[in-house]
């Protein structure tokens, strides 16, 4: 997920009160938000849930006994 996609996700959570209240203090630029520090743990859990929903273990998908992780080299 890129910075703009994450920002849109955070704006959605804020606007729909998915975390129980608004947490964005200021929209800084096209990629950055200033958010309330006391919501960070809750927000991280929500992001982790999202990442779990949009990813899948390779082993489960292909019936393989080992998981493989790929990383980009700079």
Image (cartoon, rainbow, N blue to C red):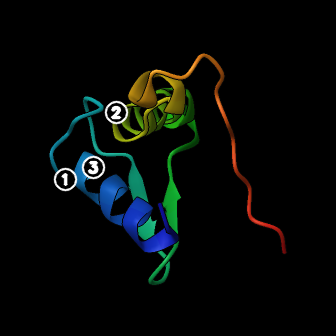
Mark with earlier residue (2, 1): 1
Residue on which the image places disc 3: 14
- The image shows residue 16, relative to residue 62, as above or below, that is below
Please name the residue that numbered disc 1 is placed on: 15
The quadrant in which residue 17 appears is: top left
| Residue at 69 percent of width and 41 percent of height | 69
Q: Earlier in the sequence, mark 2 or mark 3?
A: 3
Q: CA distance from mark 2 to mark 3?
A: 20 Å
Up-down: is 30 above or below 65? below
Q: Residues within 10 Å of mark 1 (few under 14, many from 20)?
A: some
* Residue 47 figure quarter: top left
Q: Are marks 3 and 1 in contact (CB under 8 Å)?
A: yes
* Residue at figure coordinates x 22%, y 35% from the top left: 18
Find residue 41 and name its label.
Answer: none
Say if 57 sits above or below 73 in the image: above
Report how far apart the C-alphas of labels 2 and 1 lie in the structure. 21 Å
Give yes or no for contact between labels 2 and 3 (Cβ–Cβ under 8 Å): no
Q: Residue furthest left?
A: 16
Residue toward you, 58 or 14: 58
Outermost residue, right direction? 74
Circle nearer the viewer, 2 or 1:
2
- Secondary structure of the residue carrying tag 3 is helix
Spatial CA distance of label 3 from label 1 is 4 Å
Tell me where residue 26 appears, x and y as whole percent: 43, 67
Q: Residues within 10 Å of mark 3 (few under 14, many from 20)?
A: some
Q: Residue at x 52, y 25 (%)?
A: 59
Q: Percent x, y for residue 31?
A: 50, 76
Element type at marker 2? helix
Where in the figure is residue 2, as x and y percent of width and height?
50, 68
Left or right: where 74 falls relative to 71: right
Q: Nearer the viewer, residue 53 or 47?
A: 53
Mark 2 = which residue? 53
């Amino acid at each position: 997920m890129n910075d703009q996609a994450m920002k849109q996700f955070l704006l959605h959570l804020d606007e729909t009160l998915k975390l129980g209240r608004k947490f964005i203090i200021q929209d800084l630029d096209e990629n950055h938000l200033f958010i309330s520090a006391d919501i960070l743990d809750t927000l991280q859990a929500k992001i982790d849930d999202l990442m779990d929903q949009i990813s899948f273990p390779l082993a489960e998908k292909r019936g393989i006994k080992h998981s493989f992780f790929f990383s980009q080299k700079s």
